[in-house]
Amino acid sequence: MSDFPDDIYTEPSADVHTLNNLGPLTGMAGIWTGTRGLDVKPKADGPRKQAFVERIELQPIDPVTNGPQLFYGLRYYIHITKPDQVKTYHEQVGYWLWEPATGAVIQTLAIPRGQIAMASGTATADATSFELVAKRDSTAYGICSNPFLEHAFTTVEYRIKVDIHADGTWGYDEDTVMLIRGKDEPFHHTDRNLLTKVGEPTPNPMALQALAAV
């Protein structure tokens, strides 16, 4: 049986003040930097560790509905470099979404290697720690890669754990599990960092208009 209502068209009322409705994502809104990043990546001669510096911008979006489904969320952009280098090491765009009715937390991501993913988990509105997972074979929360990556570095699972700290910082641990051509065992490509706020979030356009009208 489906957990969804028979009425798939009627939209719920939404509060345009997204920053008041982000649930467990509340502590992530804003602009952040991290200088303690560590990436463990695959190379021909084995795993290689790489330190990195990161900047993440997470800005509120207007409420989004799919018929009766309602999301509040943050649009994000990640830019990563190696210490003391200008060339981009990694960049990523996507959304963090919170569905109050179900407790669902969703991260969508796209990277310029020809790869996208959508990971999901659940959390309470006041949670300060949560974990999301995407699996390659899932048609709901999955992973899609270009043909070369599918051939040589097949991503079978992506997992991210977020911890929001009482001092206002937050951090993440990522584990991307890959099947690498010519290797017998899965490789765990891991990334982690601790983020410190350097800028406040900008309220979404609708919220600014509503506040101006009060």
Image: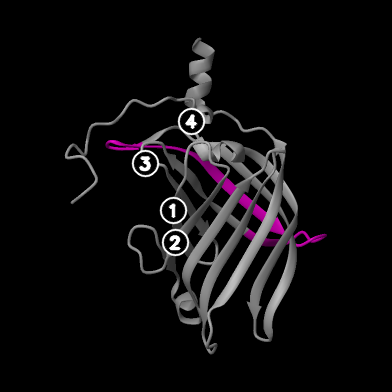
Instruction: Tell me whether the residue at label 3 lies in contact with that at label 4, contact meaning CB atoms closer than 8 angstroms.
Output: no
Q: How many angstroms separate mark 2 from mark 1 (CA)?
A: 7 Å
Taking the image as shown, residue 205 lies to the left or right of residue 103, namely right
| Labels 3, 4: front one | 3
Report the mark closest to the observer, 3 or 1: 3
Of 195 and 210, the residue lying toward us: 195
Residue sitting at 66 percent across and 53 percent down?
Answer: 79
C-alpha gap between disc 3 and disc 4: 14 Å
Q: Amino acid at mark 2?
A: Ala
The label on residue 21 is 4
The residue at 41%/68% (across/down) is 136
Q: Residue 102: which disc?
A: 3
Mark 2 and mark 4 residues within 8 Å of each other at the beta carbon = no
Q: Quadrant of residue 101?
A: top left
Q: Which residues are magenta?
A: 65-90
Could you tell me residue 111's position as x and y percent?
Answer: 54, 60
Coordinates of residue 213 in the picture (x, y in percent): 49, 11
Q: Which residue is mark 2?
A: 134
Sequence-earlier tag: 3 or 4: 4
Task: Give coordinates of residue 205: x percent, y percent.
Answer: 51, 27
User: Under tag 3, what secondary structure?
Assistant: loop
Question: In the drawing, what numbered circle is on residue 171?
Answer: none
**Residue 166 horizontal/vertical position (percent):** 68, 38
Sequence-wise first label, 2 or 1: 1
Amino acid under disc 3? Thr
Within the magenta stretch, is there residue 147? no
